[in-house]
Structure formats: C-alpha cells, structure tokens
Image: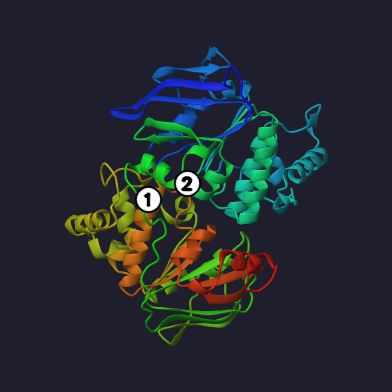
C-alpha cells in the first residue's frame, strides 16, 4: 500500500444521534489512496450509519470530515458525488422494470438533442461488463426484474464502477455471489487499488477479509475499537474486538443422529431444474452447494409450491404428496425461509409482533374477537427462544439488524415446528455474532429431529454445517456425499465441472 502525506478522506470524532440512541460516538477512520480498508463490526455497530455519512445521506452531529487536509461537508448525495465518493449499498436500489444497461446509466443516459442513443448506451454497458469481468451480465438488454438476486447485485456494482471513483464504499457486496463471482470482483478491486482508489470494504466473511484487506478498523457499539494492518491481526483477534468475547467454534456442526427419511424427491423437473433426486432424513442437514444460478433456489421454490413442477414425485414420511402452492407445502409440514428476507419473507413496515404471528392469525383472531394474550405469548416465546434483540415488539421489523430480522423469520415458524425446513442463504448479510446464534438454532432444531436443507453460497458454511452435501450445477444435482468424506477443493471441482469427487 503506497504511503501518502494526507489520506483521501479522514473522519475525526464523528458522532451521530437518532433521538436518545447514539449510533456513532467519536468514531475515527482514514482512507488512504491505493488501499482496501475493511470496516468490521456486528450488525448495529454503526457501520451503515458511518458510510451513509460518507455518502452524504446523513450528516454528523459532531466531528469533522477532511479531504486531503481540507475540511469538507457532505450535506447531500450530490456533494459526495462531487468528491467522487461512490457507495454500493447492501440494499439494492435498482429500477426493476428497466434493463441492465438502463440501470447502469440511469440519470446519465447518452443522448443527442434529447433523444436517447440506446444502441450506444448498450454498447458502453457491454464494454463495461467485459472490462469488469462480470460475464454473467453479458445480456445488457435483460430486464433487471428477471435476474437473480446475485446478478442484481452485480448490476449495482457495475453501476457504481461506471463512474470514476476516488473513494469506493462497498457494503456486503459478496453476500449473494458465488466463489467465481467473488474472485472476479476481487480482481476488479485490486485493479482499482493499483490505480490509487481508496476502497472501504464491509463484509462479515472473515476469510475474504483477511485475503483482501490492507487495513482493518473494527467498530463496536458505535465506537472505534481499533485499527490495524491486516497482516498484524488474526480472525480470533478481530472477532474478540467485534463482540467482546471469544467465539471458539465458528462453524459448529450439529450432532448427527439421522432418523427415518423425511423428504424423498425423485426425478423432479421443471423449467429450471432437471431430474433431481435426493432424500433427507430427520435429524440431518443436507447442504446444497452450487454456483449462483445453478438452480438451488429454483429447486426450493418448486418444493415449496411457488414454481410449477412438470414431472417427478415428492414423498413426505414415505407417502406421495402433491404440492401446488405454499399452502399445500405448509399443510405437509414443509417450510421455506427465502433468500431475500425483506422482499419475500417479511413485511418490513409492520411490527415484529405482526410478522411473528402472521402465519397463525386463526389462533388469536376468531371471528371478530382478538385474543391478544394468545398473540402476546406467541411473540414472547419467539423473542425469548431465539434471542431477538429489540427495543419493543411493536417496532417495525425494518429497524432490526439483519441478524435479528432473520431470527424473526425463522422463529415465527417454530410456534408449530415443521417437519422439513429449507433455509436459503440464511446468513446472508448478518454478522459473526448473529451467525453464531443462528448456527446454535440450527443445531437445536436438528437435535430435536427436524430435517433441514441448507442452501448457501458460503462453501465453508455448507461444508461445516451439513451432514450430507449435494452439488448442484446447471439445474442438476450432480452428486451427494457425506460432508466428512469430501474436501472443499473436490466440491468446487464438481460445481465448476472440473472433475468429480
């Protein structure tokens, strides 16, 4: 990392209050030209607030921002743009009904005398995609709403990188990307670093943090805990800084006491998956590994009755069942926790209590009578059992951290536990402490006899949490192996078509 006399940006004593809550308390951060500086901390530590101050979305209540020894103010997003500060938010902000190219150049479309030069815009978008190595977006005329969550994330990245940046801020950019897509993104970031761009990187994935970072700053409870070169710290030190304690086993595999076959699938096919056959037993975790777009989410949607099944059979407890809707799946004891919790799982504008009790309205609303004591007991059980951190059960779900939102989404189904639980990207965008909680919850559910299917883009997670690992490629399940009998390298070979384990 080249040394400079003055950092590109320096934040000193940044403090921010929201009512009586102190989100940031005397936070310091500096960003040098030509460095990747990771900002690390649990959900709620203040990372998002800090980068929104960098982006001109929030203004600090105290403290000073400096640009190369000149004090500056960022009263709005336009001011941040003038200083060439580009933010890639964790929450996507795309126009779903526009094409990839239209989203990349939204507000900056090439035009002549007010006429859009669409062909030129598509050509420029195509050139950018190739330059960034984001080959999954080669069809720049595709409508964004038709893309997977992972590919939408790549559109967001491409849009930010379509403009010259002095400082680039990325909030969980790899949360839904495959290993190959992550590596392509890292190559782009390293190239930008070599060009002198200062990069602020936020991630909960410790392995990629240690591989990518030059320096690391840790926040806890809105305060700066420490800053250190990545070469001088290890993951355990960083976790201790983040949570104030040691987490000894980051991936605790649940005990394995498999029972009878819970779910058996034979030759299941539709427009997205082909001839998929597998079984999962009670008291067992079946992990599905695959590159983004391989068809794992599409399989989950078919099993849950969202997508049509063209052929094949599904058996639960050895009996054939027909699942043509989520209602059918729920009646058979099968639940899907989707990958996009905010768009597909929760009603974020509604309260925590509303979301927890939503599947069970008939139990506390009978006719015109509202049995609030019954409702409140459901809410209390979920909050207590799953350790949901919140100020009040009536606060909107949107105000919770990602980890606590996920606990609400999983926990609400445990009022009447399902036989089979499908978790699609359950730890996407949640911190190491919340992950530990979620892994504990998974262990408890499996030890109680539940059958669980885990879909994750984090190969370490699949390898270490699962008892059986299925490899998914191009809509097909290419094999299932005991987790302890295969290596990560062998799994990656199967996922990419390199060889079979």
Q: Residue at x 28, y 28 (%)?
A: 20
Residue 366 makes an appearance in the image: no
Quarter that holds the N terminus? top right
Identify the residue position indicated by label 1 in the image: 434
| Crowdedness near tag 1: few (<14), some (14–19) or many (≥20) residues, C-alpha within 10 Å | many
Q: Is residue 147 above or below residue 274?
A: above
Q: Residue at x 43, y 36 (%)?
A: 218
Residue 186 percent across, percent down from the top left: 64, 44
Residue 471 percent across, percent down from the top left: 58, 70
Please indicate whether residue 498 sits to the left or right of residue 369 in the image: right
Quarter assignment of residue 160: top right
Q: Is residue 201 above or below residue 249?
A: above
Residue 347 makes an appearance in the image: yes
What SS does tag 2 mark?
Answer: loop
Quarter assignment of residue 92: top right
Q: Count every numbered label the image shows and give the total.
A: 2
What SS does tag 1 mark?
Answer: helix
Please indicate whether residue 22 sits to the left or right of residue 456 in the image: left
Please indicate whether residue 384 sits to the left or right of residue 340 in the image: left
User: In this orientation, which residue lies closer to the viewer: 447 or 240?
Assistant: 240
Q: Residue at x 36, y 32 (%)?
A: 222
| Mark before the other along the chain sequence, 2 or 1 | 2
Residue 118 percent across, percent down from the top left: 79, 40
Q: Marks 2/1: CA distance?
A: 10 Å
Please indicate whether residue 107 sits to the left or right of residue 450 in the image: right
Identify the residue position indicated by label 2 in the image: 204
Extreme residue toward the front, this view: 232
């Amino acid at each position: 990392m080249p040394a400079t006399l003055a950092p590109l940006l320096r934040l000193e004593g940044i403090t921010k209050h929201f009512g009586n809550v102190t989100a940031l308390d005397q936070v310091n951060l500096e960003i040098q030209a030509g460095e990747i500086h990771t900002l690390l901390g649990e959900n709620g530590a203040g990372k998002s607030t800090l980068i929104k101050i960098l982006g001109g979305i929030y203004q600090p209540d105290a403290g000073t921002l400096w640009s190369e020894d000149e004090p500056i103010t960022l009263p709005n997003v336009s001011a941040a743009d003038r200083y060439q500060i580009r933010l890639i938010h964790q929450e996507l902000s795309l126009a779903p009904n526009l094409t990839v190219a239209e989203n990349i150049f939204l507000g900056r479309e090439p035009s002549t005398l007010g006429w859009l030069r669409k062909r030129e815009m598509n050509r420029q978008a195509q050139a950018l995609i190739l330059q960034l190595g984001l080959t999954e977006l080669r069809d720049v005329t595709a409508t964004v709403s038709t893309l997977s969550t992972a590919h939408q994330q790549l559109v967001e990245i491409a849009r930010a990188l379509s403009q010259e940046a002095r400082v680039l801020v990325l909030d969980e950019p790899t949360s839904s990307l495959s290993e190959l897509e992550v590596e392509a993104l890292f190559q782009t970031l390293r190239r930008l670093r070599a060009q002198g761009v200062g990069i602020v990187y936020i991630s909960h994935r410790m392995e990629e943090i240690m591989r990518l970072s030059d320096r690391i700053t840790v926040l806890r409870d809105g305060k700066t805990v420490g800053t250190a070169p990545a070469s001088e710290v290890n993951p355990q030190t960083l976790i201790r800084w983040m949570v104030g304690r040691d987490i000894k086993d980051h991936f605790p595999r649940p005990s394995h006491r498999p029972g009878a076959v819970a779910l058996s699938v034979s030759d299941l096919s539709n427009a997205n998956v082909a001839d998929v056959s597998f079984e999962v037993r009670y008291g067992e975790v079946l992990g599905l590994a695959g590159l983004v777009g391989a068809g794992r989410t599409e399989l989950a949607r078919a099993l849950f009755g969202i997508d049509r099944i063209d052929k094949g059979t599904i058996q639960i407890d050895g009996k054939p069942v027909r699942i043509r809707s989520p209602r059918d799946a729920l009646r058979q004891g099968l639940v899907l926790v989707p990958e996009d919790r905010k768009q597909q799982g929760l009603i974020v504008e509604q309260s925590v209590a509303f979301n927890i009790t939503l599947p069970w309205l008939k139990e506390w609303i009978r006719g015109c009578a509202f049995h609030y004591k019954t409702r409140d007991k459901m809410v209390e059980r979920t909050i207590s059992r799953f350790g949901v951190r919140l100020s009040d059960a009536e606060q909107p779900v949107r105000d919770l951290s990602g980890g606590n939102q996920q606990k609400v989404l999983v926990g609400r189904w445990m009022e009447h536990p399902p036989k089979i639980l499908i978790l699609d990207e359950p730890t996407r965008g949640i911190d190491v402490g919340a992950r530990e909680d979620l892994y504990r919850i998974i262990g408890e559910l499996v030890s109680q006899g539940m059958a669980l299917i885990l879909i994750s883009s984090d190969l370490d997670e699949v390898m270490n949490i699962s008892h059986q690992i299925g490899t998914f490629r191009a809509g097909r399940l290419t094999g299932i192996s005991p987790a302890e009998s295969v290596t990560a390298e062998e799994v990656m070979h199967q996922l990419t078509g390199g060889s079979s384990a």
